[in-house]
Image: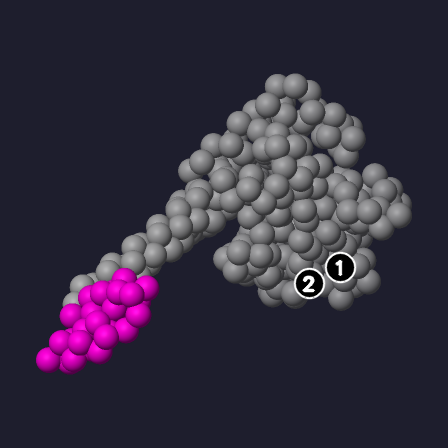
Amino acid sequence: MLCGKIDALLECGYAGGHRKCHMLSTVISHPWSIAMKLLRSLFIAGLVQVAALSAAHAQSGLDQIKSAGVFKIGTEGTYAPFTFHDASGQLTGFDVDIGRAIAQRLGVKAEFVEGKWDGLIAGLDAKRYDAVINQVGITDARRAKYDFSDPYISSAAVLIVRDDNTTIKSFDDLKGKKSANTLTSNFGKLAQSHGADVVAVQGFNEAIDLLTSGRVEATVNDNLSFLDFKKQKPNAKVKIAATDKAAEFSNSGVLLRKNNPELVAAINKALADIKADGTYKTISVKYFGTDLSAQQ
């Protein structure tokens, strides 16, 4: 009835208004048709947005890194000779150079995010960076939650004491003794497993400071770090009392978030290429005076 009244009114209008009369009549006569067209348009627009979001979410970790043009790496910056600052303040070290070489072969730039060891892995969980390259030991416990690259370096855990210490000759002698270690490191766990009272520190240098000052009786740490320390300070009155070559403590890899097979494969290829073209040898000789690839 309403449509009829409006049509009647419009028919009395100007000749040029006939098309407008017809359109208005159509809109009012077919409200459901217009509503359905509107809903269909909104539905299609929603589908397009969902598809775009799904595509972005479905991007692999490798794709995201390449899209950003940056490979973000979590590292300590206080753990010589792997990751530390030189006299000029520049971040450098074996792990840092390996990270840069990997990024180069991924076709992106390396960007380092520094943090304390005890928070590095949490930073990976929080997606502050794409990987952790910081002498992270490959263990079954970590494999259950994270992905690892192939090992890029092998070393050994060593028990370090002062030169004048004659009572600590093996790891078992740590029982009841104070050992300076980062609490969540493999070395700290090794010390605890032998009954040591672990005194928390932030890194190797602080552990050695506590040891040489007599505030702790030992530290369990990395063999290569100790050799580099002795090279820098040959007169330091510390020595290696024992060595543990267990695989759990010797192999380190690039730590990644779980379920990133494309990224793991790309990093493994980069590591293989680095070794094949002599880059790895150049880096290891720079920091250790020898080609460590021969030990893997």
Query: Can you give x and y, in whole percent of width and height, for residue 243 in the image?
Result: 62, 41
Query: Can you give x and y, in whole percent of width and height, for residue 141 in the image?
Result: 43, 51
Residue that extends furthest to the left in the rendered view of this protein: 1
Query: Can you give x and y, in whole percent of width and height, for residue 159 in the image?
Result: 66, 48
Q: Nearer the viewer, residue 120 or 156?
A: 120
**Amino acid at dot 2:** Val
Residue holding disc 1: 206
Q: Which residues are magenta?
A: 1-29
Q: Are marks 1 and 2 in contact (CB under 8 Å)?
A: yes
User: Is 15 covered by the magenta stretch?
Assistant: yes
Look at the numbered disc 2 and give the secondary structure of its residue: loop
| Residue in the image at 62% along x and 64% along y | 198
Q: Nearer the viewer, residue 288 or 170?
A: 288
Residue 42, relative to residue 78: is it above or below? below
Q: Is residue 154 left or right of residue 59?
A: right
Mark linked to residue 276: none
Q: Quadrant of residue 261?
A: top left
| Residue in the image at 17% along x and 76% along y | 8
Mark linked to residue 201: 2
| Residue in the image at 63% along x and 25% along y | 274
Q: Quadrant of residue 296?
A: top right
**Amino acid at dot 1:** Glu
Look at the numbered disc 1 and give the secondary structure of its residue: helix
User: Is 125 covered by the magenta stretch?
Assistant: no
Q: Is residue 218 left or right of residue 140?
A: right
Mark 1 or mark 2: which comes first in sequence? 2
Residue 275 visible: yes
Residue 119, relative to residue 104: is it above or below? below
Distance Cα–Cα, label 1 vs label 2? 6 Å
Q: Is residue 140 left or right of residue 40?
A: right
| Residue in the image at 83% along x and 39% along y | 231
